[in-house]
Image (cartoon, rainbow, N blue to C red):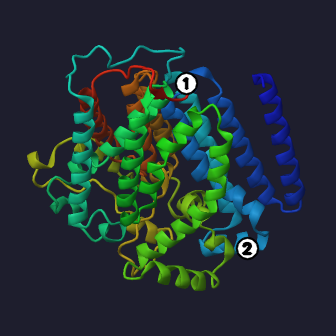
Amino acid sequence: MTSTDRGMLYIIFLLIFLLFTFISLYDKGIMLSIFAIISLNIAYIIWFLKKKYTQTYIVYIYFIYNILTLKLPIIWMMYKYSQSDILTYFRYRNIDIEDVLYASIYIFIFDILLTFYLSLFLVKKEHSKPTFNKLVIFKFNKFFVVFFLLIVSYLSKLYLVSTGVWFFYLMNDIDTTKIPFYTIATLLEKLDLFILLYFVYKFKVSTLTKKEIIVGILIFSISMFFAVISTSKLKIVILFLPIILMIIYMKKKIIPILIIIVLVPLFSTFFNVMTYLRHNPTKSMSEAIINMVKEESRFNPVYNDKLISRLDYQTVMANVLKTYPAFPKEFKFDYLNNIIGLVPRFLWNDKPMIAMDMNRIGYEIGYVHYKDKETAIGITPLGIAYYELGLFGILFITLFTAFLLAFFSNRLDTNYWLGFILSIMIAITLARNGTYVNIIPDLILTIITFFVAGLLVASEPKNDSKTVGAEG
């Protein structure tokens, strides 16, 4: 199938999608307007990502996360639930449908400004020279290096387990400033993901050996065990990223994709159980399943939808726009934490906490009960910018985000193995950081950690006759 044929097929499916949605929403007024704005927004992003200079892992992963959290949940609501159920859900969230319309427009404006800045900042060339391939590097036995990095990773995980901070349901009760080497441990525990991504690159260029496939499966299994006991859904999802990337690089993708589609309902059920266990850590798995089924029957169906409860930041954004003033009397300066965070704590004993109090913000926007002092509510970097600076925040956060995306995209060549891995790790860091008030220290520490790991791994993967991969 040629690119022209694929383009025509895409247009046909899009027109059918819009037609059926229009028929189902034609009498729903504002609901139809919201759908139209979100659809145009998604189409605009897809059009932007078609440009050659935007085709980097960092930009792609950022906008995929953007679509998943700020657009698709509302469309999913419209297809799956009645208007009365949706409006009931909005009332439960202390917003009106007009607030969601306003948020949809605000998010679209953000995307337009962001893509405009990116079009100015991104270097418009198809290939850039690798940044790291001419550095003097160490020469160690590869097996020894992989084994060493994995030992460091799993020892770091065990250390975090021993402090209790590894467990999602305990971490909000723990003062991490009192835990020695906490920041270092949270970085080093990700070295297992570094190794898995290294194997993904080798698969991409057809240099992955069968022994490395077995080692990769073993690493994935051990790491998944740690992720599951943490009850952190994000840790589990990130571990599946190497598998998703390998499927993307496969020539025959249909069977793996069908398997994933079949397993999605099981993953959804699994995550539901994880959520229940997070809030009820003393319950067993069987008790969690039974009690969860009983409790779900008492709530609004939209509220019970775990896809919406995990990804719907659009209604959160609507709450932020409704709660905080567009033109605040005074600006907040939490973005200065990007500078404060660069100073190590051992050089500044009285260094203040650079994390924001998302529990208090969650209470202010009506998502957290006043007695709940543990739950933290993410409102996305766009929401934080509005909270800090009002309407002026959209100008700042689009410029800041575009600078970060373009700065690293222009300097990392994903055709080079270390550039490939750093691009993925930076993209994950940009996606996981929900405030951007401390994103620069996070990025610097991430780059240093995985750059040093890259120096130890050392050389470009070589091809031989006993390898498998996307090209072979």
Provide residue 58's location: percent of width, then percent of height.
48, 34
In the displayed orientation, state which residue is furthest to the front.
466
Q: Which residue is mark 2?
A: 85
Give the residue type that dot 1 points to: Gly
Query: Where is residue 432 drawn, in percent x and y?
Result: 43, 49
Q: Quadrant of residue 251?
A: top right
Quarter holding the C terminus is top right
Q: Is residue 325 above or below residue 276?
A: above
Residue 338 location in percent, x, y? Answer: 30, 43
Does residue 42 appear left or right of residue 354 in this picture? right
Quick check: marks 2 and 1 in contact, CB under 8 Å?
A: no
Q: Earlier in the sequence, mark 2 or mark 1?
A: 2
Q: CA distance from mark 2 to mark 1?
A: 51 Å
352 relative position to 443: left or right: left
Residue at the (23%, 59%) spot, across then down: 158
Estimate how packed mark 2 is, as few (under 14), some (14 to 19) or many (20 or more) residues with alpha carbons within 10 Å: some
Q: Is residue 210 above or below residue 265?
A: above
Q: Foreground: 132 or 393?
A: 132
Q: Percent position (x, y) of residue 167?
A: 32, 66
Q: Nearer the viewer, residue 383 or 266?
A: 266
Amino acid type, callout 2 = Asp
Disc 1, SS: loop
Label drawn at residue 238: none
Query: Going 45% across and 53% down the picture, which residue do you hit?
Result: 384
> Can you say which quadrant of the picture contains the N terminus?
top right
- Residue positioned 66% across, 44% down in the render: 255
Tag on residue 472?
Answer: 1
